[in-house]
Amino acid sequence: MAVPVSLTVNGRPVRIEVEPRTLLVEALRRDLNLTGTHVGCDTSQCGACVVHVNGRSVKSCTLLAVQAEGARVTTIEGLGSPDKLHALQAAFKRHHGLQCGYCTPGMIMSAADLLARNPRPTEHEVREGLEGNICRCTGYHNIVAAILSAAAELRGEKAHV
């Protein structure tokens, strides 16, 4: 039995019908065709599925779509645009903070939440803020450099990374 769920996704009101056990990540990918949100582990450990729900980062594989009723959800597709990348997206590109790219949307969404709460993080705080995200390709050095660079850019400063 499908149930209706109304939410705002990337600034746009949407209404979908889902089975009560449907995870938010499944609804985003399957019902809304927002495939930038990835499923990487099936155990909520990797962070590839991170989105923002009401302004906070959430692993969308741990939240049922029905629990998001009335919520504001932002996915990687809502963070920037092809014409104007978000500062984090541009910094990941500039600092080669990705390899295969599978974890990148979750990393960027976690980093965006971190920078919203702490616009001047230290390297240690960035690394700590990414603890729920796993990258199997890199050593995290370029990811951290990208986030620190984006933080400086968002503050209107020149990056020293």
Image (cartoon, rainbow, N blue to C red):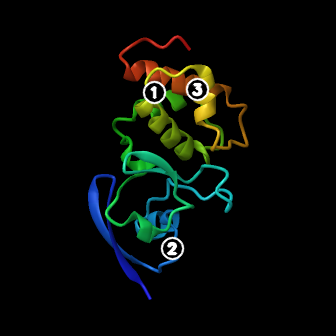
Instruction: Name the quadrant containing residue 99.
Output: top right
Query: For the residues carrying marks 1 and 2, which lies nearer the camera in this image?
Result: 1
- Identity of the amino acid at label 2? Thr
Residue identifier under label 2:
22
Residue 86's place in the image compared with 48, above or below, is: above
**Residue 161: image x %, image y %?**
56, 14
Going by the image, does 47 lie left or right of 151? right
Query: For the residues carrying marks 3 and 2, which lies nearer the camera in this image?
Result: 3
User: How many tags in the picture?
Assistant: 3
Residue identifier under label 3:
125
Label located before the other in sequence (3 or 2): 2
- Identity of the amino acid at label 1? Asn
Indicate the secondary structure of the residue bearing disc 3.
helix
Label located before the other in sequence (1 or 3): 1
- Identity of the amino acid at label 3? Glu
Mark 1 near mark 3, Cβ–Cβ under 8 Å? yes
Q: Residue at x 68, y 60 (%)?
A: 43
Q: Dot 3, crowdedness within 10 Å: few (<14), some or many (≥20)?
A: some
Quadrant of the image containing the N terminus? bottom left
Instruction: Name the quadrant containing residue 97.
Output: top right
Q: Nearer the viewer, residue 104 or 54?
A: 54
Q: Dot 2, crowdedness within 10 Å: few (<14), some or many (≥20)?
A: some
Residue identifier under label 1:
118
Residue 74's place in the image compared with 145, above or below, is: below
Q: Residue at x 43, y 24 (%)?
A: 119
The residue sitting at the bottom extreme is 1
**Residue 65: image x %, image y %?**
45, 68
The alpha-carbon separation of the residues under discs 1 and 3 comes to 9 Å
The alpha-carbon separation of the residues under discs 3 and 2 comes to 34 Å
Going by the image, does 33 lie left or right of 62? left
